[in-house]
Amino acid sequence: MPPTSNPQLAAALAAAGRGHHVFPLAPDAKYPALHHKDRCPGISACADGHLGWEKRATLDPDVIGRAWGHGPYGIGVACGPSGLLVVDLDTPKHPRDVPPPDVAGQGIADGMDVFAALCEQYQQPIPDQTLTVRTGRGGFHLYFVLPDGVRLRNTTGDKRGGLGWKVDTRASGGYVVAPGSTVNGKPYVVTVDLPPAPLPPWLLTLLTPKAPAGPPPDVASIRSRIGRLSAYNRAVLDREAAKVEEAGEGRRNTALFASAASVGRLVAAGTLPEADATNALLAAGRSIGLGESECLRTIRQGLARGAQGVSRAA
């Protein structure tokens, strides 16, 4: 394809030249500029059935030329087809977007700080000798190549095996905004122009989902062991555990935190043993599919929040 004066087209071709499968994003935005399944016309690329953005991402310069010839689209890189894992080091989005209690007071201000602290914790150098892009909001994308045959899922912050507050990862089923794009008028710019480095083994280990430790604890058996509690405390704990068990997808971790904060007042007041509260809420969280380490972290934070309420009241 001959040289082009279209900067978005040039950026899309440059990304494809790195082996990154691309697809168009809406101009100056992050979302795909492709039709949704419910509006699929069933023609062209979708003649044999609807294709979403991941399956339509391409390296073909002719397809890219036709797509970006229609307008100033942004560029999305589909991480899965490209064999990439991208570490997204984000910045706070508003004044109330502050570090969680477990890192507050440690000089942590954003995802870059969290990632640096993680590297220090594991006694590893910051893996910054790789393709790096500064995002429109001042964060950074670090691009890494996954080993052949390895598929990792996306992670968000410190949830479900993630790396920490303001540190997301994008892999299979995820995409990132490529350099040459803008979002809300702010450009994405390459700051380290190197080929993506292999994902460091220690990060691969952290991001590989752990096999379940065993079947979830039986909620009824856990509750039977707290019969020594007062009727009031037992009713409160039963009620809060039930709220966790009934939480729907997308609300489970939030519900667990809220219930832990609720019983945390009783723990702080000395009327409910912390071990009993933790065991009951852990059983409830595990019963709906949350991982043990995730549950324990959330319960610990929720109990601390409940204790703060007691100390303020005092």
Image: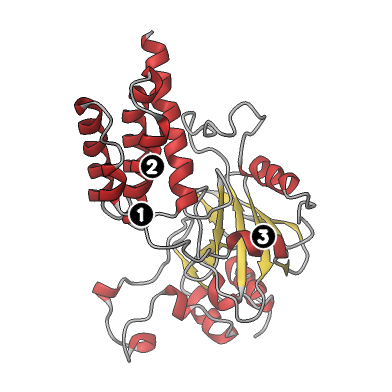
Q: Is residue 266 left or right of residue 131?
A: left
Q: Residue at x 78, y 52 (%)?
A: 124
Residue closest to the eye, 45 or 282: 282
Are the residues at dot 1 and dot 2 in contact (C-beta closer than 8 Å)? yes
Mark 3 Cα shell of 10 Å, populated few (<14), some (14-19), many (≥20) = some
State which quadrant residue 192 falls in: bottom right
Q: Identify the element where label 3 is drawn.
A: helix
Q: Which amino acid does label 1 sit on?
A: Pro
Q: Which residue is drawn at 70% across and 60% down?
A: 202
For the residues carrying marks 3 and 2, which lies nearer the camera in this image?
A: 2
Q: Is residue 56 left or right of residue 37?
A: right
Reading the chain from its start, which is encountered first: label 1 or label 2? 1
Checking the image for residue 217, the label placed there is: 1
- Residue that badge 3 annotates: 203
Reading the chain from its start, which is encountered first: label 3 or label 2? 3
Q: Residue 305, image x and y in percent?
A: 42, 27
Q: Identify the element where label 2 is drawn.
A: helix
Position of the N terminus, as image quadrant, is: bottom right
Are the residues at dot 3 and dot 1 in contact (C-beta closer than 8 Å)? no
Q: Is residue 149 left or right of residue 32?
A: right
Q: How far apart are marks 3 and 1 (CA)?
A: 30 Å
- Residue that badge 2 annotates: 279
Q: Residue 153, image x and y in percent?
A: 50, 66
